[in-house]
Amino acid sequence: MSDTTDVAIVGGGPAGLSAALFTAKNGLNTVVFDTDETWLHKAHLFNYLGIESVDGSAFMETARTQVDEFGVDRLQNELVTRVENGENGFTVVSDGNSYLADYVVLSTGARRDLAENLGCDFTDDGIVDVSVTMETTVADAYATGAMVRAEEWEAIISAGDGAAAALNILTKEKGDHFHDFDVPADAE
């Protein structure tokens, strides 16, 4: 028996959590499989946009709290072993759960085996081939961050990749080149 969700995100680093933030805050049921193996635990962020200085692990705690507040089903320490594309969407199988999803976002750092098994095309450089919206050659499957970059890894870029994937998913769901602009009246 599988649970169902609109969006399944494999990876709980900056790209995965960014995608989760946008999809969940805009009404899509979102699950994140998070093994907590992000490279940010080894980092300290200096002079990121809006941040003067923060430890990578502290940054991740803030990001997790933020997505949790929007109702993301964040499955901590869940390793995804397989993603399959079927007639009714994607099946994401982990060591503890199975989910059916309309969309899948792969945010697994340099781990590209799930994209390969899903049938995504790769470039000559060995990275996952994506469009500017981060969609792979498999419709409704997205890849982000280090999966799509040859040694050009940066948390803020990965977060942008996750946002690009989420906005494309939201455009498909809501139509008309969806934009996510908050105004002060929207803030709680």
Image (spheres, rainbow, N blue to C red):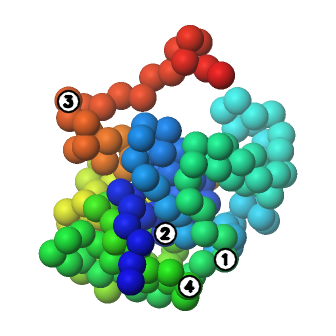
Using a 10 Å C-alpha cutoff, classify the residue at mark 2 as few (fewer than 14 neighbours), some (14 to 19) or many (20 or more): many
Residue drawn at point x = 24 percent, y = 69 percent? 89
Which residue ends up furthest to the left in the rendered image? 87
Amino acid on which the number 4 mark rests in the picture = Gly
Amino acid on which the number 2 mark rests in the picture = Val
Number of numbered markers: 4
Q: Is residue 120 visible?
A: no
**SS at mark 3?**
loop
Q: Mark 1 and mark 4: span between their CA atoms?
A: 10 Å
Which mark, by number, is residue 139?
Answer: none
Q: Mark 2 and mark 3: span between their CA atoms?
A: 27 Å
Residue at numbered disc 2: 10
**SS at mark 1?**
loop
Where residue 184 sits in the image (x, y, percent)? 59, 12
Q: Mark 1 and mark 2: span between their CA atoms?
A: 11 Å
Residue at numbered disc 3: 176
The disc, 2 or 3, on the residue closer to the chain's N-terminal end is 2
Where residue 32 sits in the image (x, y, percent)? 53, 63
Which mark, by number, is residue 96?
Answer: 4
Judge depth for marks 4 and 2 and give the one in front.
4
Using a 10 Å C-alpha cutoff, classify the residue at mark 3 as few (fewer than 14 neighbours), some (14 to 19) or many (20 or more): few
Which residue ends up furthest to the front in the rendered image? 1
Which mark, by number, is residue 77?
Answer: 1
Is the C-beta separation of discs 4 and 2 under 8 Å?
no
